[in-house]
Amino acid sequence: MHGVKECQLVKSISITHGLNRLGGHSVGGALEHTLEHFRAVVQSSADAIITKTLDGLVTSWNPGAESIFGYTEQEMLGKSLLALFPPDRMTEETQILEQVLRGSRVEDFDTERLHKSGKRLHVSVIVSPIRDRYGIVVGASKIARDITFQKMAEAQLRLTANVFTHTSEGILIVGSDGLITDVNNAFTRITGYTREGVTGKSPQIFRSSRRSLSVFRRMRRALQRFGEWKGEIWSRRPDGKDYSVLLTVCRVCDGAGEIKNYIVLLSDITSLKLQQEQLEHGAHFDTLTNLPNRMLLSDRLHQAMVICQRQQRMLAVLYLDIDGFKFINDNYGHATGDELLVAFSLLMRAALREGDTLARMGGDEFVVVLTGLGSVQDCIELVNRLLATCARPVEVNGNVLSVTTSIGVTLYPNDDVDADQLIRHADYAMYEAKRAGKNRFNLFDAVQDVEVKNRSILQSRIAQGLHQHEFALYYQPKVNMRTGAVVGVEALIRWQHPDHGLLLPGTFLPLIEKNPLCEQIGAWVLESAIQQLDAWRCVGLQLPVSINISARQFQDESFASKLAELLAKYLYVVPANVELEILETSALEDMVSVQKIMRDCHALGVHFSLDDFGTGYSSLTYLARLPVSTLKIDQSFIRDMLVDAGNSSIVKGVIGLAEAFNRKVIAEGVETTAHGTALLSLGCEWGQGYAIARPMAAEQIPAWVSDWQAPPAWTDGQDSPGTKRGANVC
Ligand code: C2E
Ligand code: MG
Ligand code: MG
């Protein structure tokens, strides 16, 4: 209670003190009025106006103080003002008190006080002594203003200024009039322009050789639409050096939306860009010759193909390989080899036209893309010119070297494939040029290539077919036309294709003639036929089987031993029942080795027949040497023998030859009874053909053998042929 009374006292003192200071008159109503006025000022002030006793107890506390410090008047009256002091500011109170006691005012000083919540506040304080009527200091009045916000703003400003000065990013500020108002140190460091040199000027002064106008147009548009633009540009320093910066340009507007400034931030990315350019160059150009490499070539070729299509012209891809480059490297060393490559590339470059591309593929291989060709002749002329240029002697490291080149050429769109394949085709053609003797060019044959590709697809399909058991052997009977006896069957391969049905050998065997697959199929045929022979033997049918052997199978020196293994496997098969048919033409290809294989096989007990006899040389010398039991007259002679006297004579001749050399003779392609009759009249008794039976599945053979009867015209009205067949049936 004492505190409050005292407080009222101090309040009245303070007011009196204030009034004294205001005017020094105390005159009845006027005084009252002034007091009221004064109280109203205190009450309405946003500043904290506080009075306190000399020992620091609060004697008055206005609403301003309440709003700044959070304590109500009630909470603070009679309480120590120290509640507002942060621990580190406690000593201030003593210093203030000392000054107040000395009767002097503590002028506006910035300090910190605590809000009721504990939050620190920045305040600006004025403390004045309060005197009694005798002039003795009895208390103090304190006016505190909350400057927290102002302090924060100042700190913010300081920070901004610091950032502006010390950041590594260049900053350029442009006024709404488009003129530069300020730049920072980093800006000067990056661009080479000083603050004095650019302020008041337009940013247009930063011209660059590399800068494109379109970038600026884009920047302006983006600023208008979005208020911001970001991008990379090249610019030039006053010393002439180019630099690259990542620019961020922002528009700064005031509250009313009026443009105040443009802030431009620049990050120096020159070294990054140069590094990137170097990398890109390295990725696209050959380091030794500085010519485009494989990657860039592929890119350029793509583009050239598009243009070529649009202009309906031709382009040529040339694959060049220096002949005997290894010799240069080995004899003169790699450094000279490298020099030669450089000299060579310069020579070629000079011989080519402006739009042509010359690329190095690696080693001594180069590719040229010739564009805009009107004809194949145009291309050939250029290629010949290039061949001549490449053959010119060049001086390298004191040596005069002269090399030649082999060039593979392919023409687009004749060779209508993609860019990579064009290069591959030219490469392939180059190898052909090398094989043909070097120092020449070779034109890729696109038509032939399509065939090769189709062939390889079909070959894989055939291999798959073999793997999936899609092949089968059909058997065509061979008979003695005069007696009606079945003398054997010929195994003929068929492909039971899941999509295309039953395929004849003529549709697939030629595709594998020169392929190892031919041997696999041949081995399969050989074993299947022998297996079938064994199966028939088991059901009491002793039927000789003829097996067609391809020329390629006969090049295999181990053929005889493989056959021996098979015969050992099917132990009960009589080797004499196995007849191998080889084409007359293939038997003559390599007489020495064929003769040896035939002899070895013959020694195993198997027989041979010469198939399609008459289509080769029918050389008597060979016939005498080869262990052949039977000659098969080619069906082409049989077919026309009835109408063509020439063919009839050939047939007669072959029959005579067989007789003379003591060989059996059989006619294939006996299509009609009349053919058979004519053959019989010429002395050929054995026949095979549609007039007798078409090739059939193995299962049908036993029934056919027992049912078949020769036409009476052949048997000449003799006994039923069935009785004669008995010789073949066990
Ligand atoms: P090839 O060995 O001369 O077989 C006779 C061919 O004439 C067979 O054709 C047969 O069906 C056909 N033929 C039979 N009688 C007549 C007839 O009266 N008129 C006509 N126009 N043709 C008749 P296929 O089965 O199409 O075989 C064709 C050729 O394929 C064979 O001729 C043979 O050289 C070869 N070949 C067949 N199978 C095999 C095999 O398993 N291995 C090998 N390497 N070649 C085989
Ligand atoms: Mg045959
Ligand atoms: Mg034949």
Image (cartoon, grey):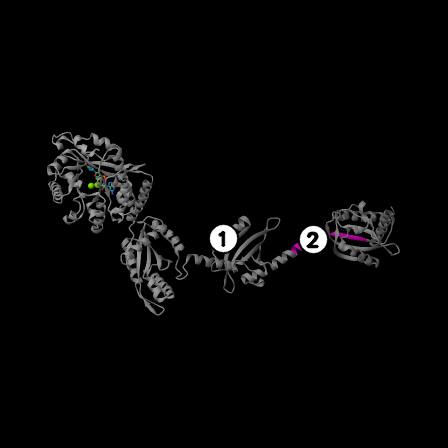
Identify the disc placed on residue 150: 2
Identify the disc placed on residue 73: none
Any magenta on residue 149?
yes
Disc 2 within 8 angstroms of ligand 1 (CB): no
Any magenta on residue 268?
no
Identify the disc placed on residue 217: 1
Image quarter where ligand 3 lies = top left
User: What's drawn in magenta, residue-wise?
Assistant: 141-157
* In-image side of 2 versus 595 (left or right): right
Give the class, few, some or many, for how many residues have Cα within 10 Å of label 1's Cα (few <14, many ≥20).
few
Across and down, in percent, residue 396 comes to: 35, 67
* In-image side of 618 versus 77 (left or right): left
Amino acid type of the residue tagged 2 in the rendering? Gln
Residue 199 in sight here:
no
Q: Nearer the viewer, residue 473 or 480?
A: 480
Across and down, in percent, residue 170 comes to: 57, 58
SS for callout 2: helix
Across and down, in percent, residue 302 comes to: 38, 51
Q: Nearer the viewer, residue 417 or 63?
A: 417
Residue 248 in sight here:
yes
Residue farthest bottom in this picture = 398
Across and down, in percent, residue 393 comes to: 31, 66
What residue lies at 17% left-to-right and 49% top-to-bottom?
Answer: 625
Amino acid type of the residue tagged 1 in the rendering? Arg
Q: How many marks?
A: 2
